[in-house]
Amino acid sequence: MPVHRSGPLRIRALATAGAVLLAVLSLPHPAAAAGSAPTAPPRGSAHMGMGVAAHDGSGGLPTVRSTRTEGVDVSSHQGDVAWATLWDSGVRWAYAKATEGTYYTNPYHSQQYDGSYEVGMVRGAYHFGTPDTASGTAQADYFVDRGGDWSADGRTLPGVLDIEWNPYGDACYGKSQSAMVSWIRDFLEQYRYRTGRDAVIYTATSWWKQCTGNYAGFAATTPLWIARYASTVGELPAGWSTYTMWQYTSTGPTVGDHDLFNGPLDGVRTFALG
């Protein structure tokens, strides 16, 4: 026959059942227990070299510096830059991020672009390309119209297309190698049409191999800015026998990203003139 629990026993039984249910509900979801995917950074926050250390590693510093000229590259994540400090440390040229895609302009661009000029540096602007959001032509126009133009004053460097690992998703922005080459070509051709100068390509050899199939067709007219955090530049992308600039570290003094121009300061000025 059924057993009827007294009041205190029934309360204890209910409390035990409630505790068990709470423990079950508190267990992590299997997907969370296995580790969820990292959250993508906000659009607009990308900058030169964002994926270099993670993909290619880092170690060592350039051993030959006397024939090269020190520079830096900056974006919004550095904020207002102490340009006088950098000048006093020997930095003579700089690039500031101007734009990304067709949706972002760097709010610190004026302080960075004009501030470097005011202390005496030769300076230029760069665009972080996002081939999954708009055409190369549209992004070149967006860049030129928002700080990426060039003038033959000897103090303005040609614009740069920063094309590297996608920090927001697929490394190659969902494009085939041939489609990526076409996108880059469209950007370069439109930049030249708008400014009369060939833009610089900033990239890493490993990304270039992965996402363009190591395409060699731009090397004849397009200066190369190579990214490699090591004591030497290592292998260059196909077609280029030398580099114009080299980003060699993301942990240098004052701003982190430091670079070398492959030549003396007079060479930087000549390069600026076109």
Image (cartoon, grey):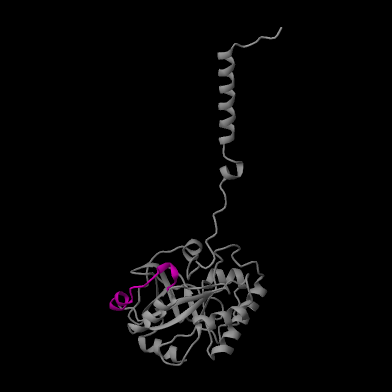
Give the x, y percent position of residue 126.
Answer: 49, 78
**110 to 255, vertically: above or below:** below
- Residue shown at 64% from the left, 76% from the top: 135
Relative side of 70 to 34, left or right: left
The quadrant in which residue 229 appears is bottom left
Residue 230 in view in this figure: no
- Whether 264 is among the magenta residues is no
Q: Residue furthest right?
A: 1
Q: Nearer the viewer, residue 17 or 232?
A: 17
Relative side of 255 to 198, left or right: left
Give the x, y percent position of residue 120.
Answer: 33, 85
Give the x, y percent position of residue 215.
Answer: 61, 77
Give the x, y percent position of residue 168.
Answer: 57, 63
Q: Residue furthest left?
A: 88
The quadrant in which residue 166 appears is bottom right
Quarter of the figure that contains the N terminus: top right
**59 to 272, vertically: above or below:** above
Q: Residue furthest front?
A: 7
Total residue callouts: 0
- Residue shown at 60% from the left, 45% from the top: 31
**173 to 141, vertically: above or below:** above
| Residue extent of the magenta highlight | 74-89
Residue 47 in view in this figure: yes
- Residue shown at 62% from the left, 70% from the top: 133
- Whether 79 is among the magenta residues is yes
